[in-house]
Image (cartoon, helix red, strand yellow):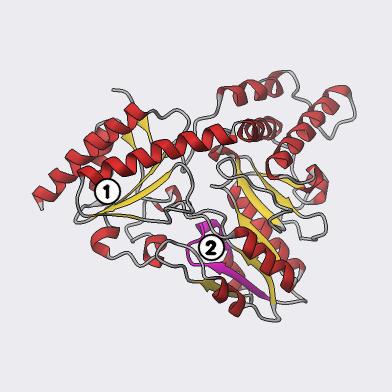
Amino acid sequence: MKIRYFDNAATMKVKREVLDKMFPYFIELYGNPSSLYTLGRRAKMGIEEARREVADLIKCDKNEIYFTSGGTESDNTALKGIMYANKNKGKHVITTKIEHHAILNTCKTLEENGFKITYLNVDKDGIINLKELIDAITKETVLISVMFANNEIGSIQPIQKIGEIAKEKGIIFHTDAVQACGNVDIGVKEMHIDMLSLSGHKIGAPKGIGALYVNKNIEFKNLIDGGHQERDKRAGTENIPGMVGLGEACKIAKDNMETHVNRLKGLRDFYFSEVKNQIPDIKINGSMKHRLPGNSNISFKDVNGNELLMKLDERGICASAGSACSSRSSMPSHVLTAIGLTSEYAEGTLRVTFGDENTKEDVEYLVENLTQIVKEIRNIK
């Protein structure tokens, strides 16, 4: 049975070009980049080329990029690194109720260590109110952290306006852009973003590699002690193949952004149209105007989400109920709760996220089977 994969927000297949670029660093250019001999220097050159390619994607200087193990480490480093470095200036962080758990649980740890966190509400589309943001700012506010685009419902926040507010108030602005990078044109300087998190396996690089952009004028504390790697901010022998792979994935994303975005939008809009025409009692979650190109999130009334996923899996269809990081929880998604979705809909939510390998025929197969399964589940009830 052919597998049709519609969970690209959870992870993507490593791109063939990325794998080809990585391969020599496993068996030929395997030297330790801290070494002085040629093999080590050549490995170091690969890292710096990758650093430049990551920087080019978000339009910053390559020396403002720090490699990490992924989005979660980048988020932890951003929030803890800034707050620990600035605790004498203030202990207040502003974030939102719909952040990824990498942010929410980091904030929880900060609260346990004496920091104060304000969690902003969102509207029915998952967008924050800028007035509420401004009203939440105090003399103690050091950091604003608002995700660029939500991993479940795909809504894109008014990032540039948030950046302008932060700059005017003299507050550091961090954004978790794990879902946005490669799907949205990002310019960190133009948008007044001071720190940005990204992850490799969301854009065709391997798992276990990511990056954190930090404006060169901002000081932050490192979380890992050891050697002098990553300019003394992230100790440990470098994952050179992963870094090289991330650099190549960023280069591909930059070079193919327009084509990629338009293609995914076409598949997503076709899917929305077909589901609306064939299945009654549904709710599309998230903003239709400000949305990631490949994201769809639909709630089906009186449908059990886990049952829906299992029946789709039996037909070779991979999708999700929401974030892969919370898929084993029996509780309703914190994102769907925040946008005010009632339980009769929230429990039957399906996130479908499209990727470069999906076709219109795949979507037709998905809709045909989804229509049958929803009807079956509702009839049993």
Residue 27, x across and y down, in percent: 69, 19
Quadrant (top left, top right, bottom left, bottom right) of the N terminus = top left
**In the displayed structure image, the side of residue 148 where residue 371 appears, left or right:** left
Q: Does label 2 or label 1 sit earlier along the sequence?
A: 2
Q: How many marks?
A: 2
Q: Is residue 367 visible?
A: yes
Residue 295, x across and y down, in percent: 43, 45
Mark 1 sits on what residue? 306
Q: Residue reaching furthest right? A: 36
Mark 2 sits on what residue? 105
> Residue at (81%, 45%) from the top-left corner?
63
Q: Which quarter of the figure has residue 159?
A: bottom right
Q: Is residue 227 visible?
A: no
Q: Is residue 14 magenta?
A: no
Q: Residues within 10 Å of mark 1 (few under 14, many from 20)?
A: some
**In the displayed structure image, the side of residue 293 where residue 206 appears, left or right:** right
Front one among 362 and 318: 362
Q: Is residue 95 magenta?
A: yes
Residue 180, x across and y down, in percent: 56, 47
Asked which secondary structure carries label 2, the reply is helix
Front one among 334 and 33: 334
> Residue at (56%, 71%) from the top-left corner?
130
Q: Which quarter of the figure has residue 25?
A: top right
Q: Which quarter of the figure has residue 185?
A: top right
Question: Which region of the structure is painted magenta?
Answer: 91-106
Front one among 121 and 235: 121
Pointer 2 with pointer 1, Cβ within 8 A: no
Q: Image height check: is 80 above or below 9?
A: below
Residue 18's label in the rendered image is none
Three-letter amino acid code at the position of disc 1: Asn
Q: Residues within 10 Å of mark 2 (few under 14, many from 20)?
A: few
Three-letter amino acid code at the position of disc 2: Asn
